Amino acid sequence: MSNLIMLILGGGFLFTGYLDLSNSLDLPNSLRYLKWKGYPLESLPSNFTPENLVELHMPHSKVKKLWKEEQILVNLQVIDLSSSSNLIEVPNLSGSLKIVKINLSWCRSLVEIPSYFQHLDKLTHLHLGGCRLKYLPEMPGNIQYLNLEGNGIEELPDSVWSNENISYLNLDYCHLKKLPSSRCKLKNLKKLYLGFSYKVENLPKIWEPMEQLKSLHLNGIAVTELPSSICKLKYLESLDLQCHKFSKFPEILKPMEHLVSLSLEDTAVEMLPSSIGNLIRLQDLKLSCCKRLKDVPTSIYSLTNLKRLDFCGCWRLEKLPSSSVGFLSLEELVLSCSGILEIPASIKQASRLSILDLNYCERLQSIPELPVLCNVRAEGCMSLKIVSSSRTALTQGWDKPHYCIRDFTNCPKLDNNSRSNIMDDAQITIMRMARKDPWPQIKIVCPGKEIPNWFSYQNEGSSVDIVLCPDWFRTGLFGFALSVVINNEWDCEDCSVSANFIVKFMGESHELFSSKYIILRSYGRLHHVRVWNEAFRSEEVGKNCSPDVYKLAKEASVVFCLVDVEGRPPLPHYDMKVESCGICPLYAEDAEKFKLFAEETRQDDDSKGGGSSDESEANESD
């Protein structure tokens, strides 16, 4: 082994140290690459001369001092002692003038860094996050990556703030007292993290154009506002301002052409500036837990690239501004736990909207017509009375299969007309998804005690017997719609409704399919009706028995039961049961009839002027 140049031990696991290596470890001086994860000793062997060593990787080691005697590592380029919690001092690297990367992150016993680091001119990456440093010496001018996360450093040396090469600077959870008001020349900086530096109360004006800065994280600091010169960061892509004292977002004086993500979560802002429309490329706007937010400007509709808008927990926000345009690019709108009273009618124009989260909007009273591809989560909307039928569900989206959830669990004030609208839309949604491969999952739930009338087979209790027509198993059968009414759902978590479809033929029973509807949670004592779909694949049938058995069968039954996550009946104290159930075979020809009717309806709408007719009909249904 005298000529060994590479040694790798530990693999993907930490070295357990069961072997006593204290007197027997002998490393060849020829080593150039040494990787030993979980190295079990307090130092490297004293007879090892590492003059040829180029890379040393010993994360999670037991090392206290790397060498008992001084060593000169003239060829060393990379050293990684990360998560070596016993390390009390940095090995002497003053002679390692070729070193490029030093990783000492999460060396929790390390309290200082030697001053000679400033002379390591080729050093570009320095990882010191998670150490216990109180002071940082001057840094070399070639540093590109500097991670100081979680240290107790109160002030950075000028050599950091004036470093024109640094591209990544992480000061999260440091104890910085202030930022420099001048001398800052970080012109190549791309990512700056200042999060949770609680003593930083003021941000200076943008020192000079940081044309490379793409990501700025200021969450958790004590600032109350940003300088208006923020718009000078013209290449900024992500701005994180989760600061609970932050109360005023500045006017955006010029268009910011690259900002795609803005987080103002948990801030004290009361309103957004009308110039928010100058964030012309914004895709993600997070305003969750802004408990003082009252007003949103109409200019928010000019954010034509906006995909996600989050107002969760904004309990003072009562309405969104009215607009004839709507959110044309929006894909997800989160209003859960907000004070929203109504949804603007223009929401139906948000043709790309796939998620509308209204969970626990306890003051919301009505939901207007929604776009066709929209999933609605409206659990716990205690004041909700009216849900308009979605005419767009009938006339649009027939060629766009999508996963669909409409959840109105624990909405006790929903009127009968709204409940009918929800279940009628369920039929349209299921038919619209006919013969898509894979067939998207559809789940609909709302308060109610009746199986929808479009279910051809339904019965009281937890099972339904079916007299099959002679050609029921014909070509074109693409699936089934299933429905149950469950009585008491008090404090139910992670339960499921299981359905088994059994075909009976000549005294034998054969399972055609089984299905499961997962109830993630439900609280209250309301009856709820649930509708979901199950795809039918003829190629799967032959695995159980010959398809001829099904073709000749004249009787079948579907049995529904409640089970927990492991398939067992739920505990007796849940007091839950299936009160009624139903099943509806779905055929391609029925879906085609729906599609033809939809086309005729669309053409009729077009001839009458389309939009105005839609609105008048929606108002009449209300």
Image (tube, grey):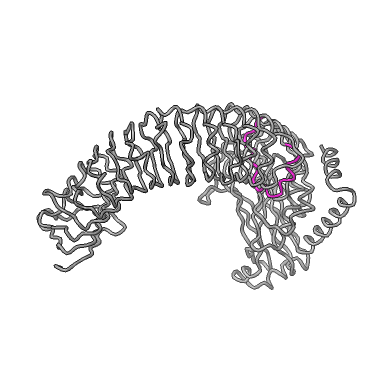
Q: Looking at the rendering, which quadrant does residue 503 occupy? A: bottom right
Boundaries of the magenta span:
344-362
Q: Position of residue 162 (x, y in %)?
A: 37, 40
Q: Where is residue 67 in the image (x, y as percent from the top left)?
A: 15, 50
Q: Where is residue 262 in the image (x, y as percent from the top left)?
A: 55, 40
- Front-most of residues 316 and 149: 149
Residue at the image point whose x is 79% and y is 64% from the top: 589
Q: Is residue 70 visible?
A: yes
Answer with left or right where residue 183 lies relative to residue 272: left
The C terminus - image quarter? top right
Q: Looking at the rendering, which quadrant does residue 467 occupy? A: bottom right
Q: How many labels does the image show?
A: 0
Q: Is residue 570 above or below residue 264?
A: below
- Front-most of residues 237 and 453: 237
Q: Is residue 64 magenta?
A: no
Q: Which residue lies furthest to the right in this view?
A: 608
Q: Position of residue 402 (x, y in %)?
A: 66, 55
Q: In this view, does 282 lie above or below 435?
A: above
The N terminus - image quarter? bottom left
Residue at the image point whose x is 43% and y is 45% from the top: 189
Q: In this view, does 479 lie above or below 461?
A: below
Answer with left or right where residue 63 lies relative to residue 598: left
Q: Can residue 237 be seen in this view?
A: no
Q: Looking at the rendering, which quadrant does residue 179 occupy? A: top left
